[in-house]
Amino acid sequence: MRINIFCLSRSLRKCAAGQSPRIKRLSEYIGESYFDYLAGLPDLVMLMDESHRYRASAGIRAINELKPILGLELTATPFVETAKGALAFKNVIVDYPLGRAMADGFVKEPAVVTRKNFNPAGMSADEIERLKLEDGVRGLRLPYGRRTGVTAVDRLNIVAHDRFQEIISEANKPDSAIHLQAVVLDADQLGQKTVTVVSQSGLATRLGLTPAQVSGSTTVAGHEVAPTFARPEEQKVAQIAWR
């Protein structure tokens, strides 16, 4: 079995526009174009990711020219937008919606976020957008492939100050595929500054050692002990001995 990986949509855009993409040009390595090579295979199977991007008629024509014996499509949005609305895909083999992926623990738990006592009146669209960006965090995919039990890792915060109640109401309908938590940010809490406290042994302090990556907001516990060695060269010898 030979696996060919290439950007299908990039090639199809030029095909659909009547242009000659690189995939259809002669390749000196195989003696014909890559497109003709693929089309000439008697057992070509196509696995098409993000397939909603090339479901338009011109894209389908270009795929059909390759004459695959089987085409398997994968997409999170199995429909094509038309003038009459969304047109759902047919011949669906497996339907695994986002709601089930959440219930099975394969993606993050989404939560919709707003500010406490938020009132968009008098705010420009740019000001609202800036506030969303300041309060926003990550994507639905889990960084470790599974939930960890740590809220900051497992939860996706959707920042929607100006549409918060609308989204909550929609998500809480009985037939909704997704149910959302609600998170309300308090401006007073957001203004609080955190302080990092690093503890090290009295011996390390006596040798003149300091913790790595100390910032302006870091407090070193136990630093009241005076170093045993005052001269820098003595401190260096002691630190080398310690290491």
Image (spheres, grey):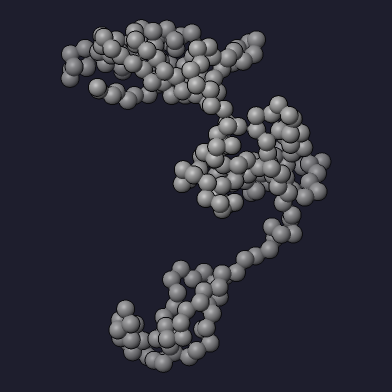
Split into 4 quadrants, where in the image is the C terminus? bottom left
The residue drawn where x is 65% and y is 48% is 135
The residue drawn where x is 52% and y is 38% is 106
- Where residue 172 sits in the image (x, y, percent)? 74, 34
Relative to 209, say whether 172 is above or below.
above
Nearest the eye: 227 or 13: 227
Relative to 199, say whether 106 is above or below.
above
- Indicate the quadrant where residue 239 lies: bottom left
Determine whether, in the image, residue 27 is placed left or right of residue 156: left
The residue drawn where x is 68% and y is 63% is 192
Relative to 133, say whether 39 is above or below.
above
Determine whether, in the image, residue 90 is placed left or right of residue 242: right
- Where residue 120 sits in the image (x, y, percent)? 78, 41
- Where residue 114 sits in the image (x, y, percent)? 72, 45
The residue drawn where x is 39% and y is 91% is 229
Determine whether, in the image, residue 170 is placed left or right of residue 224: right
Nearest the eye: 29 or 122: 29
Q: Is residue 129 visible?
A: no
Q: Is residue 168 visible?
A: yes
- Where residue 57 sits in the image (x, y, percent)? 48, 8
Nearest the eye: 25 or 116: 116
Split into 4 quadrants, where in the image is the N terminus? top left
- Indicate the quadrant where residue 73 lies: top left
